[in-house]
Image: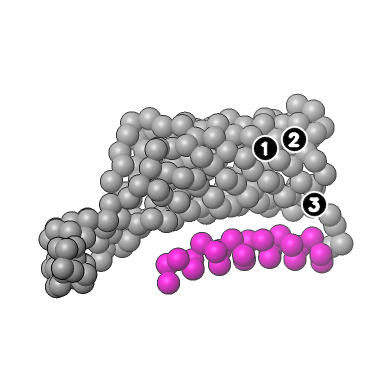
Amino acid sequence: MRSLVLPVILLMSFTCVQAQVVEDDMIPSVSVGLHLNSHYNFQLNSVSQEYAQSQGISLSIYDYDQYPVGIDFILFRGFHSSVDFLFGANISWAFIHNNQFRMKGGIGLNRFAINDYKREYEIVGGKIEDRFPDSFKPYLELEWRFTRLVSLRATTGYRLSNGDFGTVTEIVDRYPNGNPSRVNVSNDFRWYGSGWEVGIGMDIQIY
C-alpha cells in the first residue's frame, strides 16, 4: 500500500497543473536545470554520514504570471555509494514574485533507489531494509532571474524519509545447503530524519 503513495501524489500533482493549463488555454513555461546539493548528517536505512553531496537535473513547469504554483520533476545521483538515484517531484508555491526574484516554499515528494541494503535472512536477529524508501523534503528557495532565460537558485530544507524495516525472528525451514527457505520477520514501518540540505542550481528556460 505504501508503494502506491508517491506515484499517486505525483499523478495528482501533474493532473492539477495540467488541468489549470487546459482550462485557461495557456501554455506554461518550461525550463531545465542543473543542481548541486550538500547534505549534512545524512541518514538512509543504516547509512549515516556527516556530509554528502548529490548532483541532479530538473524539468520545471510553471506559469507564475497566472498561478503561484510550479512543479519540478527531478533526478539526482550521489548521496552515498549505496544509492543508485533519487527521483520524484518538487511542488512549490511562489509567495514573493516579481520580474527579478521569486521566493518559494515547497515540498519534495521523492523516492530513493538503493543498490546496497541489508537482507540478513541467514540468522535470527538479521536486519531487513527498504530498497525504495520514500522521502519528503520541506524547503525554501530563492530564485534570481538575472536574464530573461537564465536564473540561479539557492535552496535549503530538511529531508525526512520512511521505510519498511524488518527483523528475522525465526528461521522456519532451510534448504539442503543450509540457506533459509522460510523465515518469520517482524515488520516496522517508521519515519526518520535524513538531514539538512543546501543547494544551488541554474535553470535555462527552453519554452
Q: Which mark is residue 33?
A: 1
User: Which residue corresponds to the image point at 71% horizontal and 40% vertical from the top-left?
Assistant: 32
Q: CA distance from mark 1 to mark 2?
A: 6 Å
Q: Position of residue 24 (x, y in %)?
A: 84, 62
Residue that label 2 marks: 204
The mark closer to the camera, 3 or 1, is: 1
Residue that label 3 marks: 28
Instruction: Tell me which amino acid carries mark 3.
Output: Pro
CA neighbours of label 1 inside 10 A, class few (<14), some (14 to 19), many (20+): many
User: Which residue corresponds to the image point at 82% horizontal and 32% vertical from the top-left?
Assistant: 148
Which residue reaches farthest top?
Answer: 146
Residue 107 visible (yes or no): no
Q: Secondary structure at mark 2?
A: strand
Instruction: Tell me which amino acid carries mark 1.
Output: Gly
Q: Position of residue 156 (x, y in %)?
A: 51, 36
Dominant secondary structure, magenta: helix
Q: Magenta stretch: give its range.
A: 1-23
